[in-house]
Structure formats: structure tokens, C-alpha cells
Image (cartoon, helix red, strand yellow):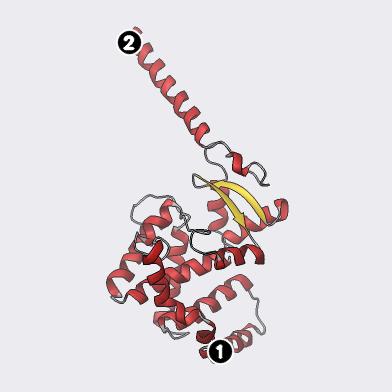
């Protein structure tokens, strides 16, 4: 009986110490004390709200919009086990998009790191990152955009014509239009057809897996994301083509 009581006491002590340790790890860093926002519940933070909003039709926009109205364009949170500062608006986008090497660096969630792999554009740094970026930078340059102006204008007119007389979900339509344009510019995909539909479907799978729980079980978003990435790596031998979808993913998350 005494042995059982001793074991129970040890287990209880370990649980208490584990909880205290987790609380210590998830305490608010001093660097974030002056930033408005909420870190949510101890240990889990706002992860459940983040996952719920991420799975909604509005996606991550819903999560950010609620907090932007409450705290402003810059706010802090604690999601998926990490302290995070969300930045919205034109100024924030300019900092992120034009930041020089060393000023701004990408640090993905664990799920994003696993889905994209260590050799993707979002994971590499230094010379390797510059080399990959040069391979796909030309279509997104000013001269590149001039070449595709007619295509972009034509698609915009077709999209607007299709809106007449029906309910329009602007976020969904804008996302579809953007993927058609960037998919054509970077991967030479036609705006309609089986390949375009498959590309959009796979993009959504990879995007949704970024905010999923890291359970590599068949049927989970995490498993589907890894499966799609492997498909692109094995079926597209061109380095430019393989990393194009990763670049599109980067642009999408940056501009959200």
C-alpha cells in the first residue's frame, strides 16, 4: 500500500512539474510585453481559435481580422506552440517583401517545415536561397509583368463578366484569380482545364496543412500535405517547377 502511495505521489509530482515547466516555457517574453494582443490560455494559447478560423471559408483572414479590430495592425498571440507577432497592412507587407537578407527571415511552424521539406525556397538560406529565388524571379519582375499584362487583363474581364447576376464571395474569387495568374506566369498553366483544377486543389491542400496538427496519419491534413509535396517533387523533375508552388505558397501567406 505504501509503495502504491509512493508511486502515485511521484506521478502527481511529475505531472505538476511538467505543467509548471510548460507554463514557464509559454510565459510572455519581455520583448513582447509592449505589443498589444492576447496570448490566450496557458500552454495552448489561441491555437484552437486559430485552427477553427483557418478551416473556415475566410481562412486565416477571419482570425486576423477579429484581432486587428481589437488590437490594431500589429498584435501578438500564441498559436501552435509558438509566440507570434502578426503584422497587417501596407507598411508591414513592404517590410516583409523588401527586407534584405538578415533583416527578415522565414521561420515556419513545424508542420510547414515538414510539408515543404528542407530544400524548398521557404527553408533555404544564404546562397542556396538566392539561387532558387533567381530561378523564379523573372516572371514576377516589372518586365515579366509587362509580358503578361494582356493575359491578366483578359482574365480580369472574364472574371468580372462571370459575376453578373450571382452572389460573389470576394475572397474566394480573388484567391482563384490570383492562382490562375501566378500559375500561368510561373508554371505556364492554362487558366482552365484539368491541370489548373488539380493545381488549385493541391495548393489548398498544402496551405491547409500548414495549420494542422503534426499527425502523419492517413486522412489527416498533415499527411495529405506531405503526400502532395512528394508528388510535385517526384513528378516534376524541373527545379523551377518544383519550387514554383512553394513560391506561390509564400506569396499567398505573405499577402493574406
Distance of label 2 from label 1 (alpha carbons) = 78 Å
Q: Position of residue 80 (x, y in %)?
A: 49, 47
Dot placed on the residue nearer the N-terminal end, 2 or 1:
2
Q: In the visual, does 109 lie left or right of 155?
A: left
Can I make out residue 8 in this image? yes
Residue under circle 1? 149
Query: Please, what secondary structure does the residue beneath circle 2 have?
Result: helix
Foreground residue, 171 or 71?
71
Residue under circle 2? 3
Query: Please, what secondary structure does the residue beneath circle 1 have?
Result: helix
Q: Position of residue 241 (x, y in %)?
A: 36, 76
Q: Judge the density around disc 2: few (<14), some (14-19), many (≥20) Cα neighbours within 10 Å.
A: few
Marker disc for residue 8: none
Q: Residue furthest top?
A: 2
At a point 54% along the width and 57% down the height, the residue shown is 54
Q: Is residue 83 above or below residue 64?
A: above
Q: Judge the density around disc 1: few (<14), some (14-19), many (≥20) Cα neighbours within 10 Å.
A: few
Q: Do the residues bearing badges 2 and 1 touch, measured as CB atoms within 8 Å?
A: no
Viewport quadrant of the C terminus? bottom right
Viewport quadrant of the N terminus? top left
Q: Is residue 246 above or below residue 152?
A: above
At a point 41% along the width and 80% down the height, the residue shown is 187
Q: Nearer the viewer, mark 2 or mark 1?
A: 1
Q: Is residue 214 above or below residue 160?
A: above
Residue 135: quadrant of the picture: bottom left
Can I make out residue 220 in this image? no
At a point 64% along the width and 82% down the height, the residue shown is 163
Q: Is residue 79 above or below residue 206?
A: above
Q: Position of residue 174 (x, y in %)?
A: 59, 75
Q: Position of residue 51 (x, y in %)?
A: 53, 52
Residue 116: quadrant of the picture: bottom left
Looking at the image, how many numbered discs can be counted on the residues?
2
Amino acid at each position: 500500500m505504501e509503495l502504491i502511495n509512493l508511486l502515485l505521489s511521484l506521478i502527481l509530482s511529475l505531472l505538476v512539474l511538467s505543467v509548471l515547466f510548460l507554463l514557464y516555457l509559454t510565459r510572455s517574453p519581455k520583448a513582447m510585453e509592449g505589443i498589444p494582443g492576447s496570448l490566450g490560455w496557458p500552454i495552448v494559447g489561441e491555437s484552437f481559435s486559430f485552427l477553427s478560423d483557418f478551416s473556415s471559408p475566410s481562412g486565416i483572414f477571419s482570425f486576423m481580422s477579429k484581432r486587428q479590430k481589437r488590437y490594431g495592425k500589429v498584435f501578438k498571440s500564441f498559436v501552435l506552440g509558438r509566440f507570434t507577432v502578426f503584422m497587417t497592412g501596407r507598411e508591414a507587407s513592404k517590410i516583409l517583401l523588401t527586407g534584405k537578407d538578415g533583416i527578415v527571415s522565414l521561420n515556419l511552424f513545424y508542420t510547414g517545415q515538414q510539408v515543404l521539406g528542407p530544400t524548398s525556397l521557404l527553408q533555404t538560406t544564404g546562397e542556396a536561397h538566392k539561387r532558387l529565388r533567381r530561378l523564379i524571379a523573372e516572371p514576377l519582375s516589372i518586365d515579366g509583368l509587362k509580358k503578361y499584362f494582356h493575359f491578366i487583363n483578359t482574365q480580369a474581364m472574364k472574371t468580372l463578366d462571370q459575376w453578373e447576376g450571382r452572389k460573389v464571395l470576394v475572397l474566394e474569387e480573388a484567391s482563384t484569380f490570383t492562382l490562375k495568374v501566378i500559375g500561368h506566369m510561373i508554371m505556364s498553366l492554362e487558366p482552365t482545364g484539368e491541370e489548373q483544377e488539380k493545381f488549385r486543389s493541391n495548393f489548398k491542400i498544402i496551405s491547409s496543412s500548414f495549420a494542422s496538427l503534426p499527425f502523419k496519419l492517413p486522412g489527416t491534413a498533415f499527411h495529405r500535405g506531405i503526400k502532395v509535396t512528394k508528388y510535385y517533387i517526384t513528378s516534376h523533375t524541373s527545379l523551377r517547377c518544383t519550387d514554383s508552388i512553394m513560391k506561390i505558397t509564400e506569396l499567398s501567406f505573405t499577402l493574406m
